[in-house]
Image (cartoon, rainbow, N blue to C red):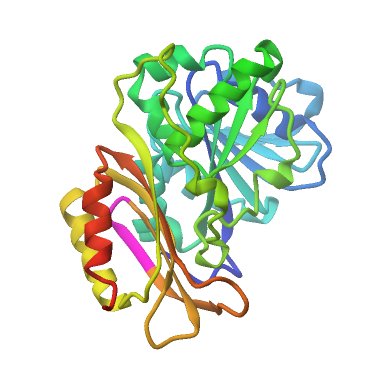
């Protein structure tokens, strides 16, 4: 999934269920003086409500802002809009795409990783999901896509955090981490956050794969007050021993071929046989990438991996991984 990115423009996919604060965040980007040249693509241009005093020009439904940003809307499909935007690529250094509140970000992410028409000029830098802290429980109870938006994310914003108590926010944070323990989490009010937390995060860069202890805590999903019907969750596995990377690659590829649409994301660090370097891997749906990275040095040599998806069977995953460990 990696490619030389020196001349490519990074893209941030912004998602979140209806009312989570995506439009508020986009307006912050378009109006504030943050010193970055960002192209914002919105699904519904009418939602931006841009002050005309902030505009310096309009061309082919592309609005230029005084702060260096430009804004356009998805006219028919995303690829067409991106191609139209790339004709103005001298005007921006980043792209932020608003995903529809009713859709999973998975297919869009897959398009960036597969479509040559896109990845010759752009690369997906990360997926950001806003969560309405006040109404999150209702969304998680009734709407499957709300779980998928959380599952695919690299950064999660618990927005409107000022509208709930500290205890409610802590319960929501624990619940969200049980779905996706790998994401970085922020509590926000009115979608206010430093843009440096959202762009240039290298969410799909193998060099940035680093598993913290938090990802191996048992976060639960045991809150009886918030029943849910979704089977989307995460499985964290840690084990000792040395792994044959060829066997592991074969096992994981077969898993993704058979169940790839249910394994949304995975990533891990392996102690490979006959090597003093860490073997890093990650996947999105059925797209898999793995390679040797930096040396272990003084770090503890342990195999750590996280799988996020639907109907994951931890015992079966552990059995498959054990089959790749040298006796």
> Magenta segment, principal secondary structure?
strand
Q: Is residue 73 above or below residue 267?
A: above
Q: Position of residue 321 (x, y in %)?
A: 28, 63
Q: Nearer the viewer, residue 9 or 219?
A: 219
Residue 128, x across and y down, in percent: 55, 39
Residue at image position (40%, 29%) is 147
- Tell me which corner region of the image, top left, top right, bottom left or bottom right, holds residue 151: top left
Q: In the picture, which quadrant includes the N terminus?
A: bottom left
The residue lying furthest to the bottom in this view is: 274
Task: Decide which of 149, 15 is in the foreground and name it.
Answer: 149
Residue at the extreme left of the image, as rendered? 258
Residue 152 lies within the magenta run: no
Q: Quadrant of residue 68?
A: top right
Residue 92 lies left or right of residue 143; in this view the side is right
What's the residue at 48%, 22% (across, down)?
Answer: 17
- Residue 287 covered by magenta stretch: yes
Magenta part of the protein: which range? 285-289
* Position above or below: 118 against 47: below
Is residue 300 visible in the rendered image? The answer is yes
Q: Quadrant of the C terminus?
A: bottom left
- Residue 313's x, y, as percent? 24, 44
């Amino acid at each position: 999934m990696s490619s030389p990115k020196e001349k490519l423009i990074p893209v941030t996919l912004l998602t979140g269920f209806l009312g989570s604060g995506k439009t508020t965040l986009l307006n912050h980007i378009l109006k504030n003086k943050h010193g970055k040249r960002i192209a914002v693509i919105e699904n519904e241009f009418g939602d931006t409500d841009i002050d005309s005093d902030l505009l310096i020009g309009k061309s082919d439904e592309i609005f230029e802002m005084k702060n260096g940003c430009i804004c356009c809307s998805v006219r028919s499909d995303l690829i067409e809009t991106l191609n139209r935007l790339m004709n103005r690529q001298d005007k921006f250094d980043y792209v932020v795409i608003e995903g529809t509140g009713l859709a999973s970000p998975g297919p869009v992410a897959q398009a960036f990783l597969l479509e040559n028409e896109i990845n010759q000029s752009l690369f997906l830098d990360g997926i950001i999901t806003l969560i309405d802290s006040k109404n999150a429980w209702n969304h998680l109870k009734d709407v499957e896509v709300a779980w998928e938006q959380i599952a695919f994310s690299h950064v999660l914003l618990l927005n409107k955090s000022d509208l709930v108590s500290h205890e409610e926010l802590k319960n929501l944070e624990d619940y969200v981490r049980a779905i996706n323990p790998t994401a970085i989490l922020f509590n926000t009010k009115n979608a206010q956050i430093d843009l440096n937390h959202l762009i240039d995060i290298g969410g799909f860069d193998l060099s940035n794969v680093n598993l913290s202890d938090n990802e191996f805590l048992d976060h639960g999903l045991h809150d009886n007050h918030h029943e849910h019907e979704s089977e989307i969750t995460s499985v964290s596995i840690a084990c000792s021993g040395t792994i044959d990377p060829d066997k592991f690659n074969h096992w994981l590829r077969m898993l993704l071929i058979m169940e790839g649409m249910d394994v949304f994301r995975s990533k891990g660090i392996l102690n490979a046989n006959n090597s003093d370097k860490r073997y890093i891997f990650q996947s999105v749906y059925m797209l898999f990438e793995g390679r040797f990275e930096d040396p272990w040095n003084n770090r503890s040599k342990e195999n750590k991996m996280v799988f996020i998806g639907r109907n994951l069977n931890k015992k079966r995953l552990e059995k498959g991984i054990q089959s790749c460990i040298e006796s």
